[in-house]
Every structure is written in C-alpha cells, then in structure tokens.
C-alpha cells in the first residue's frame, strides 16, 4: 500500500554522486524494486482499497514491437498514479500463448507439422535447422507439437518480461499467468460448461467462414475485408418459356451449387418469374425464382444467383427462404470429387467432371472456359476491384463451408440480448468517450452468434465427449461433460466417466471433441482467470468488477466485446468500470506499425539508445485513443528532461535542500518569506491541483504537460534567479526561504514525475530520502498542500512569471550585443504597467543579481500593442552594458 513518507521517513544523510547520469538505472532499480516488493499486491484487503487492472496479455509468438511499449506505458502511468493515491493496485501480467499465432511460429521455427495419426515420441527433438520446403518438415504427434508450442512460448515470455522490466512496468510479476496453463484451461473450460448449462452455448451444423490454409473456422470478429481484383461474368438461366434470364456474378465457379435466383419484390423486370423455375446453364438444374428485399435492383442485372455458399447474403437467403443445401467446396478448398445428386443430366454430369477435385481458382477457370465454348457468356467480363473476406491472419479468401461448430450467444440473432449488451456498453466509462460508438456500432451490426470452436491443435480443448451409436455416429445433442473436479481435461486423452479407453472411437463407445476454443474465448475471461473466479470467492470479490481495462482501440470488437459478453453471462454485470483505449503507433508515412507490414521498430534498440524514461515520456505524451507518430525527437526531449532532473536536483541538494526543510504544514510556511519563493510555491500549488484533476480523468498526457511546464519554469527561471540568495549573500533568513522552497518543490516534482520517469525520480530520491519514491503519496493528498498553499497565498502568484519576463529581456539584450551573459549591465530601464511594476519590485533583488544589473530603474507606462495584436505590458526601454572585456 502506498504511504505518504513526506516528512515521516527517517532522515537520511544526503549522498549526491559527483557525476550523474541515466546509464544503468534500469537494471539498478528493477532489481531493487523486485527485491523490496515495491509493486506487490496485498491480498489481505477490501474491495474499496483495491484498484484492479485487467492487463492485456500480449501474444507470445515472436517479438514485441514499439506499439507494445507505447500502450503498456500508458497503462503503467495510470497504475503508478493510483498506487500513489493510496490504492492497493492489482496489476498482473499475462501471456496469450494459445492459438494460431503460436502454432504458426512453432511450425516455421522448428519446421514441423502435426498429424493426429502419428504416435507420441517422448524423446522427440526437433531438427536443428528446419527444412526450407514444407513438404520436408517433420511430421509429429499432436502431443509432441503441443510440447514444442509450450516450450517456445515460454522462451518468448522470458524475453518479453525482460523488456517490460527494462521499460519499468510496475506490474506484480507474482500475478503472471498464461492462457494455456492449467489454471487458465480450468477456468476457461468451467466457464464454457457453465455457458452450456445456462443455454448460452450450443452446437450446430451450419455455414461457416473457413480458412482453407489454416483449416479452421473463423469468427465474424476475425474477418478482414481486402480489396482484390475480380470480374463480373454475365450469362443466362433459361425460363420455362425458353426466354433467357441473365445474371451477373463474380463467382461463376459456384454455378453448380446454385439453389435459387432472387430479385427485389418491387423489381418489375422479374415479378413475372416469382414462384416459377429456371434452368441453370451447363448443369441443367432447375431452381426457383424468389422475391427478397435484400436483392439490389441497381446491382448487376438486378437478379442474383444464390449458391450455398458464396457470401453472407447467400446464407441469409438460404436460411430465410429455406433453400436446399448444395455445398460443393470442402474444408480443403477443393470441389467435391463425386458428382452431386442434384446434377442428373448427362451434360451436367460431364461438365461437373471437369470441376471435380479442383481448387476454387482452377474451377473458376474451367467454368468460364465451358461457358465460352457453349457461347453463353454475354459480352466481355467487367473487371472490378471488390472487397473480399479474409481471415485477419490469412492470405487467401475465405470460403463458406458447412460444418458442425460451437457458438456462444452474443446478440447476433437475438434483439433483446443485443440491446442488453449495448446497454452494458453504456455502463462503462470510456476514455476517450467517442470510442463507445465503435462498440455500439459493432454490436448493432452483428449478423450471427460468436463461433468459438477452432480446428486447431494448440489451445484450450472443448471439454466434451459424445456417445457413438451402433453405426459410429456421434450424438451431438447430448454431449458428455466432465465433473468439475476433473477440470482441466483433454477429451482426446482423457476418458469420460462410465467408459473405458478401448471404447474410444468405436461404435457404441465415445469420441472426444477434437476442437479447441477460439483464443478469444479464453482471453475474454482474463478478469475471471486472474481474479481466481470459481476458486477463491473472497479474492475474486476484492478485484471484480475490475477498475480498468486498457487495450487497443482496434480490438474493441473482439477482446472488449467478448469480455463484456462473458461477464454478462457469468456474473450478470460489466467486467470493469473504466475502459482506456490506446491509439496506434504510426510510421513516418502515417501508416500503422505492424509486424505484418514490416515497419516496426524493435523496442530494445530505442530503450538502449535513449533509456526507458525517455521512451516512456514519448508514450505518455500521447492521449488515450490518439494515433501517434513514432517520434525520436520526443524521446530526445524526454531524455533531456530526465538528465535535467538529475542535474537540477544535484544543485538543490548541494545547497542544503534536505528533507527537514520541506514545507508541509501551515506552520512550516512561516520560513517562506521572499515573494519570489511564495510565487513559485503558488504556481506549484496550481500545477498540483490541475495535474491531479487531469490524472483523475485519465488524461495523463495533460498531467505530464502541466508538470513538465512547471519543471522547466523551476529549473530555467526560478533556479537561475535565486542563486545569489541561495548562497547566502542576503542573510540567513533569505537563504532559509529559498532552501525551503527548493526542498519543497523538488520533493513534489519527484513525485509528480514518478509515474512518467520512474528511474530518474527514484535515483534522485535515493540521494536524500529512504525507501522508494514509488511508495510515497501523490502530492496534494489530504492536507499535504496546507504548507504550500499557505506560503502561496501569502504572496502574488505572478511575481515569478513577471520577473522571468524581465530577466529574459535583459538576457536578450546581451545576446543581441553579442556579449557574455555575465557581462555587467551598468544601467537599465524597464517600462511596465503599474501591476507589473509592483510584481517586479517584489523580486527586484533577485532580478538585479541574476542579470548582474547595477542600476535598474522601473518606469510606469501604458501597455502597447505589438505584432499580431500582442499586448505588451513590460519592456526593456533602455540598457547600458559595460564595455566588453
């Protein structure tokens, strides 16, 4: 728990190094923080004390990129702020290591592929060098492949943890988890079984988006539209009266799968055909013509060929018009090798033989050639670019095949549930607020339930078995579920109660479900997994619903929505209170950085070059939801800030700014006697108030801007003005005032900057304080501002700003004269308004000393209008410099 150590920790002898620098701070303090458990979550707590974060588990399948550094830093500054506000921060880190990305990495890295018919080899070792040709890859058992996936992802996770540690993430590493470990598998399977018992999960034989490369079903949320070249082909169907009914299609290869033609009910061109049949060319299959409002009169010929299945419209027509299923494309992406039963004419059978077993591409070419040979193509094909569905990780267009899959209800087919889930979105606080519309738009446009089964190897197994009848057919309607004590289970290895091993996959016995759950089906349970749902109720109730879900805005439709669905089903609530959406990192061409585009920056390079505090500064300078350019100059500014903090702190501490000089109570404020010091503390007071308000609104970027602005004002203006007085030239009382101001400002600044630059701030803290700055309170908590506020309200807040303007004009005069800044100003006159003169008089002694001015006259004058209608109420009207040396 954070504690306010200001004025309460044991006084420490100041030990400022002769040379200061940022090098080595990451390793030094990362080790110290872990040893001292600075960021440890205390499970002995109550819900009101906790601030819980549902941290995104990065995909452990390769390498992190600068986008991870960007978004995870933004979460970390929030976590650090909440910890300093006295919260018991629950900040875990998980690794999303199950599913397709890990499988692909392991296949390519080791040169292996899996075959369920291959026996397990307990001594298997992958080849030292993977074969270049996939045909020469090792074929291994399912279990051997899973073991390789587990080992490789574990190695990746070690590297990830090292990078996040170098970055300074304040996670509690004792709360780490993997989405494929026994704990996650148990929670995921228990949740699925609960969904099944409650009627939220069901299986069905239905049209499914299918990736022929990865041989797996794909959910709606994983679809990606890509613009690809295509063409419209126009050819006729034949009506009963012999007339021709032309259709236009981009998928002529599906002609043999045609089930109907549809046109809009109001389209007069086709109203006479509704309820009648037409005959398909080449295959001589009779199909009925239907009216349907989904048909578009202004698209193509205005009448569409319905094939099962070419696109999502085909599925809608098939379902609503109750059309026959005429699926020809299989899971391998090839046309069926046997002639389908609905093709019965001799010509149709001969023509289909030219398609049997072909890929979609080859079948398309064959159909076009047959249409040309029969002189059925009307005109030249119309070349187009059109959007086609792809799996987001695939490189071939998806096909729609009929398969048995598992689904979770998500409102896609239930208006009442859809409206409930939209309302759940209204219960969340969105940062930034405009992102909520993306959630609502996604839910409103769902076209089906969430397909959660995948035909992969490395994942959380669907925990079910099915009885086999005497012919060996599975009873999908009455699955066999494991007992709760058995979880987690592998249905392909474990045996259901009441059966024996020799009954597996034999008639009258049982078979295990071969599929795994979609990785999102497990990731959607991160609050339940890390919160110990169903295993420790007290623990779960102390963190759930979570306070914060940080994530990228591009996965609102997947991770965010799916988590809302699961919490609604399992806990009847939202999973968290606040949603923080990070933007993308853009390359110099304003394109999103991604591994697939090859434009990513390796985080270790920039961390090694600029240091973690500098990189964090760049990331924290961007507001939530803002896509931000990768900007090296921002990192340079961040590094300069950290170095300046070290040097300015060294100066202040060497002047005697010790812990016991800090002004923390109203009584302490009596030592602050000089108007310039009072003015600085007034500005510090305002900066703390504004910075705190911004942070409380999750606007950490504004907080950083406010704090940084004050910091540079403190170092470049205030410190330069008070040096003479700080060295005791005007007596002990004046010196005591400035030293107390320095100590107070430094103490506050270290804590204000701690969430953003944790290494430099803790380094300075160690020079003069005990413990860690990250175990202290955020400035301004409770009555802490009493001393600063008292000192601030004693004087005029504008004194420092006005004196700063005056000294800058004196410095400019010296620069214009090309003399050194230490050159004496023999005489100078400043003309200003009466208010500004009052403020200048309050800091006149420091102004003279800082500017080395012998005779400084203040003359009252009216404000004048400068360039761009700027009102100038203070100007240097006369200056006489000493002769150059």
Image (spheres, grey):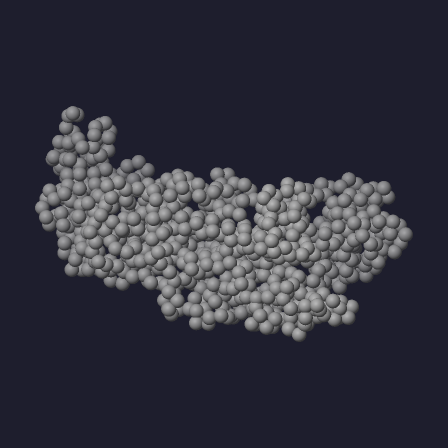
* Residue plotted at (27% across, 51% down): 765
850 left or right, relative to 20: left
Residue 34 vertical position relative to residue 599 in the rendered view, above or below: below
* Residue 173 falls in image quadrant: bottom left
Q: Quadrant of the C terminus?
A: top left
* Residue plotted at (35% across, 63% down): 87
Residue 17 visible in the current orientation: yes
- Residue 332, how many percent across, how many down? 72, 52
Judged from this view, the residue extending furthest toward the front is 123
How many marks the image carries: the answer is 0
Residue 614 vertical position relative to residue 428 in the rendered view, above or below: above
- Residue 256, how many percent across, how many down? 80, 52
- Residue 7, how many percent across, how many down? 22, 58
- Residue 226, how many percent across, how many down? 63, 46
Q: Quadrant of the N terminus?
A: bottom left
* Residue plotted at (49% across, 52% down): 157
Query: 640 or 470: nearer the eye?
Result: 470
Residue 226 visible in the current orientation: no
* Residue plotted at (72% across, 51% down): 333
617 left or right, relative to 124: left
* Residue 79 falls in image quadrant: bottom left
Query: 348 or 299: nearer the eye?
Result: 348
């Amino acid at each position: 728990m954070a504690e306010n150590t200001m004025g309460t920790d044991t006084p420490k002898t100041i030990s400022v190094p002769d040379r200061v620098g940022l090098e080595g701070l990451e390793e030094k303090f990362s080790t110290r923080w872990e040893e001292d458990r600075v960021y440890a979550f205390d499970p002995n707590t109550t819900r009101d004390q906790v601030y819980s974060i549902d941290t995104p588990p990065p995909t452990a399948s390769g390498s992190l990129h600068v986008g991870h550094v960007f978004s995870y830093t933004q979460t970390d500054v929030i976590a650090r702020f909440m910890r300093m506000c006295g919260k018991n921060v629950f900040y875990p880190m998980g690794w999303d290591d199950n599913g397709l990305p890990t499988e692909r990495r392991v296949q390519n890295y080791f040169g292996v592929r899996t075959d369920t018919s291959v026996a397990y080899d307990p001594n298997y070792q992958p080849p030292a060098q993977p074969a270049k040709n996939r045909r020469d890859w090792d074929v291994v058992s399912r279990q051997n492949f899973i073991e390789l996936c587990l080992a490789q992802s574990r190695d990746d996770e070690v590297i990830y943890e090292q990078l996040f540690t170098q970055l300074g993430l304040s996670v509690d590493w004792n709360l780490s988890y993997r989405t494929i470990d026994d704990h996650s598998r148990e929670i995921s399977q228990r949740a699925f079984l609960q969904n099944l018992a409650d009627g939220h999960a069901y299986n069905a034989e239905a049209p499914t988006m299918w990736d022929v490369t990865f041989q797996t079903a794909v959910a709606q949320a994983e679809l990606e539209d890509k613009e690809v070249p295509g063409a419209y082909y126009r050819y006729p169907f034949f009506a009963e009266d012999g007339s021709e009914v032309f259709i236009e299609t981009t998928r002529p290869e599906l002609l043999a799968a045609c089930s109907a033609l549809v046109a809009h009910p109001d389209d007069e061109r086709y109203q006479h055909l509704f309820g009648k049949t037409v005959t398909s060319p080449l295959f001589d299959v009779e199909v009925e013509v239907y009216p349907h409002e989904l048909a578009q009169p202004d698209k193509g010929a205005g009448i569409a060929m319905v094939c099962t299945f070419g696109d999502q419209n085909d599925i809608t027509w098939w379902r609503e018009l109750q059309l026959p299923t005429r699926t020809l494309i299989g899971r391998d992406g090839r046309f069926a090798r046997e002639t389908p039963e609905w093709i019965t004419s001799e010509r149709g059978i001969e023509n289909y033989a030219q398609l049997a077993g072909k890929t979609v591409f080859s079948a398309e070419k064959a159909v076009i050639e047959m249409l040309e040979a029969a002189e059925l193509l009307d005109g030249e094909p119309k070349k187009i670019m059109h959007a086609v569905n792809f799996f987001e990780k695939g490189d071939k267009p998806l096909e729609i095949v009929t398969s048995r899959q598992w689904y979770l209800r998500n409102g896609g087919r239930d208006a009442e549930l859809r409206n409930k889930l939209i309302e759940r979105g209204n219960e969340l606080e969105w940062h930034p607020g405009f992102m909520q519309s993306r959630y609502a738009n996604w839910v409103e446009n769902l076209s089906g339930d969430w397909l959660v089964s995948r035909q992969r190897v490395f994942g959380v197994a669907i925990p079910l078995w099915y009885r086999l009848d005497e012919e060996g057919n599975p009873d999908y309607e009455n699955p066999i579920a494991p007992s709760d004590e058995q979880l987690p289970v592998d249905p392909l290895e474990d045996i259901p109660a009441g059966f024996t091993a020799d009954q597996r996959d034999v008639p009258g016995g049982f078979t295990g479900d071969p599929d795994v759950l979609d990785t999102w089906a497990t990731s959607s349970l991160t609050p339940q997994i890390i919160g110990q749902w169903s295993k420790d109720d007290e623990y779960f109730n102390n963190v759930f619903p979570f306070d914060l879900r940080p994530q990228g805005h591009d996965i609102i439709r997947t991770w965010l929505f799916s988590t809302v669905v699961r919490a609604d089903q399992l806990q009847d609530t939202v999973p968290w209170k606040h949603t923080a959406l990070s933007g993308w990192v853009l390359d110099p061409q304003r394109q999103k950085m991604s591994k697939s585009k090859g434009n990513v920056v390796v985080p270790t390079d920039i961390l090694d070059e600029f240091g973690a505090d500098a990189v964090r500064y760049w990331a924290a300078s961007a507001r939530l939801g803002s896509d931000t350019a990768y900007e090296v100059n921002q990192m340079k500014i961040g590094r300069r800030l950290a170095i300046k903090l070290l040097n300015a702190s060294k100066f202040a501490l060497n002047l005697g700014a010790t812990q016991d000089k800090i002004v923390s109570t109203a009584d302490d404020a009596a030592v602050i006697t000089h108007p310039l010091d009072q003015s600085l503390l007034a500005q510090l007071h305002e900066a703390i108030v504004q910075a705190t308000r911004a942070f409380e609104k999750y606007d950490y970027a504004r907080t950083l801007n406010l704090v940084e602005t004050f910091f540079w004002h403190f170092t470049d203006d205030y410190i330069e003005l008070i040096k003479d007085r700080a060295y005791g030239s005007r007596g002990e009382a004046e010196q005591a005032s400035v030293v107390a101001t320095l100590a107070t400002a430094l103490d506050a600044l270290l804590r204000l900057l701690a969430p953003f630059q944790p290494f430099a701030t803790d380094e300075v803290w160690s020079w003069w304080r005990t413990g860690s700055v990250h175990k202290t309170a955020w400035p301004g908590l409770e009555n802490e501002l009493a001393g600063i506020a008292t000192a601030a309200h004693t004087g005029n807040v504008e004194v420092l700003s006005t004196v700063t303007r005056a000294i800058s004009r004196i410095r400019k005069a010296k620069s214009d004269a090309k003399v050194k800044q230490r050159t004496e100003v023999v005489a100078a006159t400043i003309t200003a308004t009466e208010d500004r003169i009052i403020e200048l008089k309050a800091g006149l002694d420091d102004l003279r000393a800082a500017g080395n001015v012998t005779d400084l006259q203040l003359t009252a004058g009216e404000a004048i209008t400068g360039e761009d209608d700027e009102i100038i109420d203070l100007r240097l009207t006369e200056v006489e410099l000493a002769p150059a040396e």
